[in-house]
Image (tube, grey):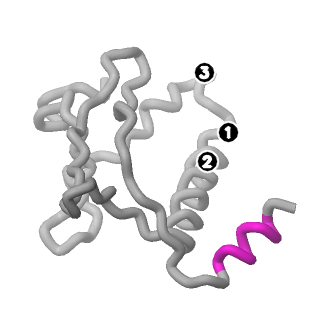
Amino acid sequence: MLHNEDIFSDPDTFKPERFLSADGSLCSNVPYPIKVFGFGRQICPGRHFAHDIVWLIIAQGLAAFKIEHTINVNGKEIEPKGEFTPRLLIMPEPFKCQFTLWFPEVKTLIHSSAQ
């Protein structure tokens, strides 16, 4: 259902930008992929919770860390290849990146939240 070429152009390619317009706002003509949670009596009762938790985890990670390309021994950035697993659950293949704290106090926040 989420691979319908009439709705999603090039559905087998990971393109999150398909949900954004030129100015960076959400595109209104591309439907939100709610179908992944099922339908009718079989719909996931935790779908709203799952959606909110994923958003919070991403927001917290981006608030604490800069995610940047890894630098090789020659001082050049290593560009991820953008390859994905050919499985039921499509995931990106492992790639190298660098996480840096936005500011030093984040380390204290992370340690205090882990306790």
Q: Residue at x 56, y 51 (%)?
A: 54
Q: Is residue 84 above or below residue 46?
A: above
Q: Magenta-highlighted stretch: main secondary structure?
A: helix
Q: Are marks 1 and 3 in contact (CB under 8 Å)?
A: no
Q: Label 1: how many residues lie within 10 Å, few (<14), some (14-19) or many (20+)?
A: few
Tell me if mark 2 has few (under 14), some (14-19) or many (20+) residues whose alpha carbon lies within 10 angstroms of its own. Answer: few
Q: Mark 2 or mark 3, which is nearer to you?
A: 2
- In the image shown, does 65 or 50 lie closer to the viewer? 65
Q: Position of residue 4 (x, y in %)?
A: 20, 26
Name the residue nearer the viewer: 111 or 31: 111
Residue type beneath disc 2? His
* Residue under the point 87% across and 62% down: 115
Labelled disc at residue 48: 2
Give the magenta-colored segment's residue range. Answer: 106-113
Secondary element type, mark 1: loop
Between 28 and 114, which is closer to the camera in this rendering?
Answer: 114
> Which residue is denoted by mark 3 in the rendering?
42
Q: List the residue tagged with mark 1.
A: 46
Q: Can you tell which of label 1 and label 3 is closer to the viewer?
A: 1
Based on the displayed image, in which of its 4 quarters is residue 107 positioned? Answer: bottom right
x, y percentage for residue 92?
Answer: 35, 34
Where residue 106 appears, x then y in whole percent? 64, 77
The quarter of the picture where the N terminus appears is top left
Total marks drawn? Answer: 3
- Of marks 2 and 3, which one's residue comes earlier in the chain? 3
Q: What residue is shown at x 20% (from left), y 58% (from top)? A: 74
